[in-house]
């Protein structure tokens, strides 16, 4: 049972599970180290119950590298459809993908 579960998480299926998750790419302000964390939307997002009865989601991450005292704080807010609405970062910066992949094209 455990063996099967581990194989599923660390297997080569990770690349095609991007539909329910995304990569969080950040750079440390201190040592310029880059981090590429995969966020699984189905279990890493926190539920927030709004006053009007709707549900929104948020994410808080603390990232720090080996041998670096700097701690990068990331906060993200999502709507009820788990679409990113806003994000903040402290002690680091978001790395934008300069070469976005296009699904259709030559
Ligand atoms: Zn650092």
Image: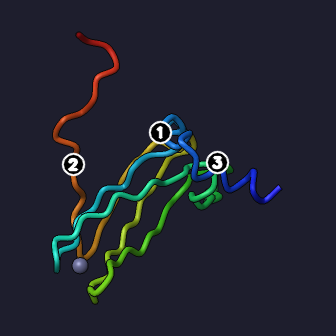
Q: Earlier in the sequence, mark 1 or mark 3?
A: 1
Q: Name the residue carrying label 2.
A: 96
On residue 54, the disc is 3
For the residue pair 25 and 90, the one nearer the viewer reads as 25
Residue at screen point 22% across, 70% down:
33
Mark 1 Cβ and ligand 1 under 8 Å apart = no
**Viewer-side label of 2, 3:** 2
Query: Badge 3: how crowded within 10 Å, few (<14), some, or many (20+)?
Result: few
Coordinates of residue 93 in the picture (x, y in percent): 21, 64
Q: Can you say whether 2 is above or below 60 in the image?
A: above
On residue 44, the disc is none
Q: Secondary structure at mark 3?
A: loop
**Viewer-side label of 1, 2:** 1
Mark 2 Cβ and ligand 1 under 8 Å apart = no
Q: Name the residue carrying label 1.
A: 15
How far separated are the C-alphas under marks 1 and 3? Answer: 31 Å
Q: Quick one: quadrant of the N terminus?
A: bottom right
Residue 91 shown left or right of residue 11 in the figure: left
Q: Can you say whether 21 is above or below 44 in the image?
A: above
**Viewer-side label of 1, 3:** 1
Residue at screen point 30% across, 56% down:
25
Where's ligand 1: which quadrant?
A: bottom left
For the residue pair 60 and 50, the one nearer the viewer reads as 60
For the residue pair 56 and 4, the one nearer the viewer reads as 4
Q: Quick one: quadrant of the C terminus?
A: top left
Q: Secondary structure at mark 1?
A: helix
């Amino acid at each position: 049972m455990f063996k099967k579960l581990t194989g599923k998480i660390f297997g080569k299926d990770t690349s095609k599970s991007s539909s329910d998750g995304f990569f969080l790419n950040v750079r440390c302000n201190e040592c310029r180290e880059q981090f590429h964390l995969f966020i699984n939307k189905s279990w890493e997002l926190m539920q927030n119950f709004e006053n009007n009865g709707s549900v929104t989601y948020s994410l808080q991450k603390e990232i720090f590298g080996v041998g670096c005292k700097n701690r990068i704080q990331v906060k993200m807010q999502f709507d009820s459809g788990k679409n990113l609405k806003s994000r903040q970062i402290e002690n680091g910066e978001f790395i934008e993908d300069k070469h976005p992949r296009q699904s259709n094209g030559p």
